[in-house]
Structures are given as structure tokens and as C-alpha cells.
Amino acid sequence: MIKKIFIVLVILIVSFSFYYYWQNRYVELRPVILKEYDRPIIFFDNQLYKFAEPNEVPANYYKNIDYVIDRSVKDYIKRDGKIYVRYKLMNDLNLIWNYTLWSTDPEWFKMKREMDSVNGRDYKKVIYYK
Amino acid sequence: MYTSRLKPELDLKKSLTPSEYTNLFGDPFWTLPGNSKAKSIYWQMDDKQKAEMLKANYIKMIEKGRQRNWDHAADNLQWWLDGSGFTKIIDFKWLRSQREVLSSENLNIERFENDEDLKDFVKEFNDGYTDKYVAYFVHQVKAGIFGELFYMSGYSILNSRCNFKITRKKNDFLLSGTIVHSWSDRYDWHKGAHAYIYGFGYVGDSDALLVEKHCGAKPFDMKSTWKQNFKATFQIESSGSLNLKLR
């Protein structure tokens, strides 16, 4: 009986560890766009979005995404010019779509520039929309 | 020998009774199949005849929608058939009664509550300092196929824009301001897309495009805006996150 409990416990710990690792590993950030309208039956929110193909990447995305991510994401890594975020974040395609939209929206940059100064000092690096 | 090009057209239409002619789709709301004779005649028609028959069936669909109290879906189909192309303002109270719209609204509000940018921003505040926090989040509203929203709009966009004034009072942060929700969609049809209607199968959007081409129907934009006021007090927790609750 104790052996069975032990085996179940080990399986649970291994499964949880694997799940934790999987959710928290770093993956490359990619631009997300809306899927073309084909009116399928949708079960999950993520089915509404897709990763942009190279020819579908919005103009100025690569120039501006650094600033968007710096303002919006706590845990990220920048390596060899690429941005890596946690898988659990990347799996939220609606949020990544928002980052993609912001990176190409001068209005968003204008809004954020107004928040760059707190207590009379700049706490964020002011970057203008490129 | 009779050579008029109109002759076969007249024959095709006349081979159906008025009730058969307007029963191409059946009644999708009550899962009644369409008339098989009407379907078979429909496939023999040319594009213009198909468009006219489809228009008559859309008018019938409007009638059936109203019988079911799906007035918003019926109004939109009528607006499209009328072909003005004018933007239609949708009643926000009705939109907010649709669970999909409310769910998107809640998700966007939740995004503000958990925004990393807001956390970093307020952490810099000295006691007594006041500043403005502005941001927006967008969500695509996904209409379920069994609800009126699906027939009225399909997929739409909800853009929620906040404008909050935040003041630090010792360890408390006092928030006041608004979130303006802007809902929008375009009532149009997409070549290659289709919708499933029981009894008729998949109805291609290309059919509706025929009605646009031959009967003057026209796509249009739909919009709606509503504003919510907020007042809340929150603190920075020991973990560094904010215990901000806007709902």
C-alpha cells in the first residue's frame, strides 16, 4: 500500500515539475495577427489568432517591439537581437496580439510617453515611435 | 422557335410556388430543412436569378428572425439588403446582454488590473503624488453559433481604453476614472467563407456576394460605445503585485 502511495506521489511530483518547466521555459516572441475570417467553429480563444508569416509582419514591428515588451513584460530575455518570453505568456495569443498592435500604433507610444515622467523624473527610457 | 433569353428564367421561377421559392434555407432557428425542389431549381439558375431568389429568402429569414425576437440580427440583414452602406450604431445595452461581449469586457478590465506597466508606474509614486495612467487593450469577441450575436455580427472587436487618475496616500493608491469600451465590426461577407445552416448545409458567403452584385445590398460598419466609471483603492502587496480590483 505504501509503495502504491509512493508511486502515485512520484508521478504527481514529476508531472507537476514537467508542467511547471513547460509553462515557464523561455520561447521566442513572435508577432501575432488575426486569423483570416473563415468562420469555423471555435473552441479556444487562441484559434482566433495566428503567428505572422515573414510577409505578414506589420511594418515597424521589429523597430518598436523592444520598448513595448520592456514596458509590459516582467520576465524576458534579449539575446542575439531576439526577445524570449515565458511560454505561459506566449500562449496568451490575445495579449501577444495586443503587443503586436501597440508596436505599430503611434497613439500608444504617445500615451506612454505621457507616463514616462513620475515625480518630475523620467523612470522609463523615453523612446519615440520609429 | 422561341428564342427569348428570358424564357428559361421565367420557367425556372414559375416551376416553384411562392412558399417553395422562399423556402431555400428552411427554418434554421427551428432546425427545419429547406425545400429540396427549391434547392434543385436554385442550382440550375444563373447568377442573377440566384441573387433574386436569395434576396427573397433573406427577406423570409428576416421575418423568421423577428418571430424569434432576434430583432438585432434581422435589422442588420435588412440594413445590408437596403444597401445604404451607412454605419449602424448598435444598442450597447443589448450588446452587454450578450455573454460573449461581457466576457471580453471583463477580460480587458482584468488586463488593466494586472498590467505590468501600471505596477512599475505606481511604484515610483511619492506620498501625495498624483498622475494619469492611460492604456488600452483589444479583444476579439467570439460569438457562439447558437446565439443571436453570431447571426448579427460573427466576430467583432472590443477596444477598451482607460483613463485613470491615481493618487498615492501613504500606502494606499486612490484610483478614479473611466474605461471607454468601443465595440466595432463590419457586416460583410468573405469569398471562400461559409456558415452552417441546418437543413441546407453550408451556405457560402459567395451567395451573399451575388446579392450584393445583382440586388444592391451593401456591407456596412457597426459601432457601439459605452463608458464605465471607476473608483477604487489598492495597495502594493509584499509580492510586488497590486491588489487592484475593478469589478
Image (cartoon, coloured by chain):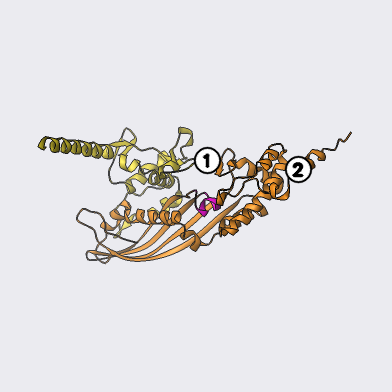
Chain colours: A yellow, B orange
Frontmost residue, B177 versus A127: B177
Q: Secondary structure at mark 2?
A: loop
Out of B25 and A9, give the one closest to the viewer: B25
Q: Nearer the viewer, residue B187 or B136?
A: B187
Q: Which residue is mark 2?
A: B15
Q: Quadrant of residue B128?
A: bottom left
What element does badge 1 sit on? loop
Q: Residues within 10 Å of mark 2 (few under 14, many from 20)?
A: few
Res A38 label: 1
Q: Please say if B23 is above or below A78.
A: below
> Residue B17: x and y, percent?
73, 48
- The residue positioned 89% from the left and 33% from the top of the image is B1
Q: Please provide percent x and percent y for residue A32.
A: 42, 40
Q: Do discs 2 and 1 share a chain?
A: no
Q: Is residue B68 above or below residue A85?
A: below
Q: Start and end of the magenta stretch? A: B145-154
- The amino acid beneath tag 2 is Ser
Q: Is residue B89 left or right of residue A104?
A: right
Q: Is residue A113 visible?
A: no
Q: Is residue A50 left or right of residue B23?
A: left
